[in-house]
Each structure stands twice: as C-alpha cells, then as structure tokens.
Amino acid sequence: MPPAPWPTPRTVRQAAELHARLTTSGHLLLHPPSARHLLNSLVNCLEPHPLHLRYALHLFDRMPPSTFLFDTALRACSRAGSDPHRPFLLFRRMRRAGVRPDGFTFHFLFKCSSSSSRPHSLLLCTMLHAACLRTMLPSAAPFVSNSLIHMYIRLGLAADARRAFDEIHVKDAVAWTMLISGLAKMGMLCDAQLLLSQAPVRDVISWTSLIAAYSRANRAREAVGCFKTMLSHGIAPDEVTVIAVLLACAKLKDLELGRSLHLLVEEKGMPTSENLVVALIDMYAKCGDFGHAQQVFDALGRGPRPQSWNAIIDGYCKHGHVDVARSLFDEMEVRDIITFNSMMTGCIHSGQLREALLLFMSMRRHDLRVDNFTVVNLLTACASLGALQQGRALHACIEQRLVEADIYLGTALLDMYMKCGRVDEATIVFQRMGKRDVHTWTAMIAGLAFNGMGKAALEHFYQMRCDGFQPNSVSYIAVLTACSHSCLLNEGRLYFDEMRILYNIHPQIEHYGCMIDLLGRSGLLDEAMDLVKTMPIQPNAVIWASILSACRVHKHIDLAQCAAEHLLKLEPDEDGVYVQLYNIYVDSRQWENASKIRMLMEERQVKKTAGYSSITVAGQVHKFVVSDKSHPRILEIIAMLEEISHRLKSLGYSPLTSQITVDVDEEEKEQALLAHSEKLAIAFGLISLAPNLPVHIRKNLRVCEDCHSAIKLISRLWNREIIVRDRSRFHHFREGTCSCNDFWSLKKSMFLKMILSNLKQNPCFLARSTPMPAIPDDNTNSLLFGVDNGTTFKTESGYSSIGNFGFCGNAFLESLMHLTYQRISAKAQVRGSVFPMLASLLIFSYGQNLDWMATIAAWAEGTVKFKGQYRSFS
C-alpha cells in the first residue's frame, strides 16, 4: 500500500475523525487504498469492546470485497473477542463472494476458533482444517500450521495438535515451543519433557513452560531440577522463569534457592514487575523469612494495587501473625475479595471467629461480591463458634443466589447446622442437595454421630453404600464415632473389621481411638487395653484420655493411674488430666491421693480451666459462670432457679452432693450445685425465650452428672427441648431423656436392669413393711430415669424416690446384695466385673454408709458380709 498523505490514527476516536474527513472529501469511495488504510488503522486501534467491532465491520461492509479486507475483518474479530460464530459467517461470506482465502485468513480463523469454548465449535474447527488443506498454498504451511497447533492446544485436543505438528515438514522453533508449552499446560508433563529433549533448539520459553507446569502440578522438586538443567545448557532465565521457580521454592520452603534468585534479579537488573514482586514476597513469607518479605514489600510493593498487599497479608495470616496482617489490612486503600478472604481465613485459623464474621459484614458494605470460597470459610467459622444466626444469614445469601450453590457449599452448610445442634435443618439441606459426594455423606453421618443419633448415622452409612459411594477412611471415623457415642458395641466391632477386609483401609490413630473409646464406654476396659497394647501406632493423648474417662465411670482406679501417667508425660500442662484423676480419687474416697493431685497441680502451676455456659437470646450472647450474679436479670434468674429446685424435688430428685468435695453442710452443697453455670443459663433461657423455642446452651467443659440429671427432668417438666453442646458432644434433652443415653450411669443401668429383672421373679426379698413396687419393663430406654443420681426410678405410675418406691435405706441394699448373692450362687461361672459393678453402685449412692463400706472392702478378698456372716463368692 502506498504511503498515506495523512498521519496514521492511534485511537478509535482519531480513526473516526479520519473517517469523517475521507467521507467529506470523497476519498473513501474514489480511492480504495485510502479506505483500506483506514480500516487497517482502525483494526490496529481496536479494544475488546462490541461497539468498536461493530464500527469496524460496518466500515468493512461498505468496501468492495478482497482477500486483504476479509483478513482485516477477521483480525478485528480476533482482537475484539467477538461472538465465536461471526468469524465463520465471514468465512462463508468470503467463499460465496468468490474471494480466495490465503494463509492469513486461516491464521485468524484458527486464532478466533481457539478462543471459543462451545462444544459444537470442535466440528467447525475440523471443517476449517479440511478447507485449509484444500486451498492453502504450500508456502504458507509453516505459518498456518503454528496457528493450527495453537487452536488444538487451546481446545484441549492434544492428539490433534500432535498430528498437526507431525505433518509439518520443516518445523521451526515456534512450532516446537508451542507444542511443548501446550502439552505442559495440559498436564502432559512426560510428553512435554520428551519433546523438549528431542527439540533441535530449546529456548527459554520452552524451558519456562515446563518449569511452570511442574510448579502448578505441585511437583516442585522436578521444577527446580528442570531449572538447574536449563542453566547447565547455558540458557539464561528471564523474569517469567524466575517467577515459576520462586513458586516452586515457596512450596519446598527452599529459602536458599529463593534468595539466590532474588540476588540474580538484582544482578541482572531484571524489570521488577508486579508479578515478580508478588512472587518474591510469597516465597519469603512461606519460608518464614518475614524480614526479607517486609523489605521487598516496603521497597517495591506499597503501590495502589492490592496484589502485593494480598501476598504479604496472606503470608502473615498463614503463620499466625494475624495482628500484623490486620494492621496492613487497615492501611490498604483498595481491597479486593482476595484480601478479605485471606484475613477471614487467618482469623478463623487463629480462633478469632467473631472477627471473621465482622470482616464479612465489612466486605458486604464495600459492595464486594461474595464468592464460594468466602462463604465456605464463614460457614466453617459459624460451625466452630455455634453462631446459628450468622449461619442462617449465610444460608439466606445462598438461597438468594448471591453465590452459586455447589456441592462444597451444601456440605459446609450441612456441617454448620449439625454443629449448631440443628439436626432437622441439616437434614433438610441434605435432602435438597441435587448432587452429593462421599464428603457430603460423611458430614451427615458425623453430624448425626455427634448429636447422639448413632442408629440414624448407621442407616445413612448403609444408604450411602447403596447409592454407590465407596466409604473412605474419614467415613469410617464418622461411623465408629457414631458407634462409640451410642454404645453400639457389636456394630462398632463389625465396621472396624469391615474397613480392613472389604475396603483395605488400614486403621489410623483416629480409628483406634474411636474403637478404644467404644470399648471403654461399654465397660470392656481389659479389651480396650489389649487393643492399646497391640495397635501398630503409638497411642496418643486422646486414646489415654478415653481410657481415663472410662475408668472414672467404671471405677477402675489402677488403670486410671496408669492412663494418667501416660497422659502427664504427653501433656504435662493439660489441666483436664489432673481434674479427672482427682475426681476419680474423690469418688473412691481416696482423700490422700486426691490431696496429692491438688498439690501436684500447685507445684506445676497448672490452673483448672474455669467452666462457663453461654446462651444466645435475640442475637446477644449471654455468658454465665458458676454462682454468677453479674447478669442484669439476676433476680429473675434466681427466682426461676428456686422454682426449678422446688419442682425437681417434688419428683423425688435429690442433688448429687457427693460431687462437692468441700467440707460444708448438705444445704450449702445443694445451693452450690444449683448455681452451676449450665443451670443459670437454662434458667435465663426459660424466662427469656418463647415457650415453643428450644433452649440452646454451649459449655466449654463437660456437663456434670448432677446437671445432666436435672436437665433431663427440666425438659420434661417445662416440656422444652434443651440442647447442650459441651466439650465432646451434643446432648439433646427431650421429654426426660437425653440423646447420650446416660453414658455416666451405663454400668449402673446394666446392673440395676439385672436386679429389677430378678426382683420381678423374687419379690419375697423386698421389705414386707413397704408396699410392693410396680416394676417397670426392662425393654425400653426409660427403664431407669434419673438413675445417675441413684435416687429416682420410673414406675408405671410416674416418678418416685427410693423412699416412696417400696424400698427404704438398708433394707433395699440388703435386698440387692441378697439377690446378687443368689444369682452368683446359681451359676458356676460369673464375670469378675459383677463385683466392682455392684460396688460402684453402692459406693456412688451410699458411700457414706460405713457398714456397707466395710462390706465392699471385704469383696476385694473374695468374700462378702451378709447379716453378720461372711460368705465366699469364689
């Protein structure tokens, strides 16, 4: 084209001004070179904007067709990113007009096709390839072939790209580099590595593509190895290479190599682009060298754009320096979604869950669109915090389509509701999910397990396998937890064996922990210890804590001391170990040993964690500690506590004062038990919440036995559902029962079940001076109600204390012992656990009785004193 008599336009506006001048002067129609120059200049100025493309095509339509003009129009489509159909329509129009395509035509067609993601474009691309082979001149083959390879690579068709590459007779460096880079980006690293070794010319782009692909595939060592091989071949790295290797260094935490690369950048005087600065900060931060990370950031990264800020904030957050990250966050002028996500994740991991929720609200005020990653993180925070109202607000965001619902969001939402004790709402979320995976099923099973619904959890596990999902290791942890929390011994044994036999899943420490906890809860402490000794993994603190907890329930003092010794070696500063062992000694009246534990705590400066309970009313969290009188409504709370105490005693409830080890009178002990934090929180809930709302309590420690017994009765008396989330599980109290099935009194329930069964057959052993009791059936969960305080039984006519039940003091105990003696005498073989089982009941309920204490002590020698005579049980 001859030189134009006017300057070449540099913007669309300048091109439009030139267009106006050519139109008014008549050159647009009378001088075709001027028109072609205008269109070519306009296309060079185009931006990815539909109006710009429409203007260029409108100008093209007013010109006589030619190969150059069609190529220019196709180039405009490529630059502006038009509708993927438009280039094909232009090509069809070109063929119908009889205009012969050239190499540039197919080059731009292939380039436009590579940006299309429509499935039917694959067929069109194949048709274009065929048309190219029919019409293309041999001289244009190398130029068009490179575009063809690029198109197939972009569409993910590696085999077609390789075939197009093999058809090139003379392959240039561009073809080699394009195919190597493409295969590397598609994850075909072995093929890319082999092709690189065969290439006659290996430039920095080929090496960098392979290094970057290794880094993206989490194969950081291979990336570093490839980089060192490149250096050995005398290829100098460029900025992109350094960024790729810095990413690998960050993953490997290879600070030495990272510093060498930083030094190389300074020595070579490489341009420090924003990407390079971010890569350096990220590498130093992930390697823990925050001194150099801060230096790079202060020297190069304090710009208006948020990328470098995000890198250093993310680094501080991931290493637990949330306060430093927050100070930088507050300094930022422009924050994006990544900034907020990094800060919220850091707050969640450091336990600052409320701060994470406040950041979410701040993000909404900045009109930043919430993404799925944000919502999943926040749902995790709500689950850990028990923040039900905030979790429901996030659920509303999902329902309003503010974020796109997917399987990860659904699973996080389900988990949140389960960890807030809302099983019904979690079940609705689960049932509404159109698509589930094994993680969704596992979250459902685990949630049911922690809410004490073991049988429902196992039913879901069965349904999961019926739906074709194969359980993984985590699934079996959830299943065994369900068995443990619901004392499903046979099922637990079955699944523990099944995971190894059917699915070849080798038990990890978590599986052993669940099984040992199940055996301990079931009273099989010898079998639990056998498993501890034979397991191929060294037992951790969780396992020994399970043993210690079971020892307290089943009064196994020797084993408790052994478990405590191991725990004190593993966690010498854990206050729970000392408290548990102290309580065991107190329960067994070993005052001297209990005193030693207190002295040991003082010597080691171990402080007992203060217990507290909290309840949320009208969006406000109310926190209570024992004997708390600081609440604004304390007078109303005390009045409700007095009403609770009166109504409980009317049912025969007697506070478990043996839990109070301080030497005070019984009345003061009762008042101390009444002032426990969970009772204060429940009293506040009863006066503050509507009668149809459940009372939801959170407690940082395990709920005590007396409170557990009292809350069961409160749930029946006030006809309220009470949900208590303590340190280890949920307790759902409904109509006088608890979802935990009274773990503390399991052993006593088993024994009393046996005694009551025997009393049905041998009523003559009851004291004749008292009315005959109505013995309840023993085939229901409610056989013994409130048995954990040793005083209240359920009869056919309601709830009665021992005094009203037909037993009185020693006469009742005498009957129990006589019946036990007869039962033992009638069988040749008796499990040795029968004696400590009965001893536990008598010590727990009547330990103050010295006569019976002497009898219990005599059992240790294999004899029992009955009505003044010793009879051997051996």
Image (cartoon, rainbow, N blue to C red):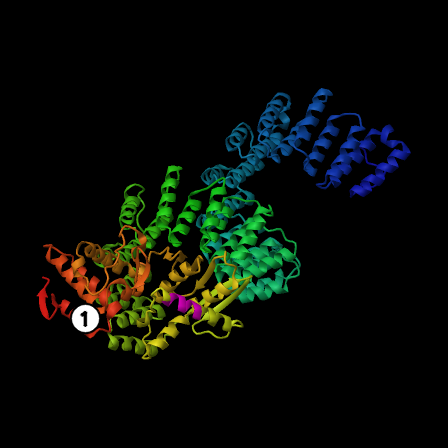
User: Looking at the figure, which quarter contains the C terminus?
Assistant: bottom left
Q: Nearer the viewer, residue 197 or 298?
A: 298
298 left or right, relative to 320: right
* Displayed quadrant of residue 167: top right
In the image, residue 457 above or below residue 624: above
Q: Residue at x 50, y 58 (%)?
A: 691
In the image, residue 46 above or below residue 550: above
Residue 727 visible in the shown view: no
User: Looking at the figure, which quarter contains the N terminus?
Assistant: top right
Q: Residue at x 74, y 40 (%)?
A: 46
Q: State the residue position of label 1.
A: 852
Task: Count residues near mark 1 (Cα–Cα under 10 Å), then give few for <14, some for 14-19, many for 20+.
Answer: many
Q: Position of residue 434 (x, y in %)?
A: 50, 39
* Displayed quadrant of residue 37: top right
Which residues are the magenta region?
642-649
Q: Is residue 250 magenta?
A: no
The three-letter amino acid code for the residue at tag 1 is Trp
Helix, strand, or loop for circle 1? helix
Q: Main secondary structure of the magenta part?
A: helix
Q: Nearer the viewer, residue 295 or 404?
A: 404
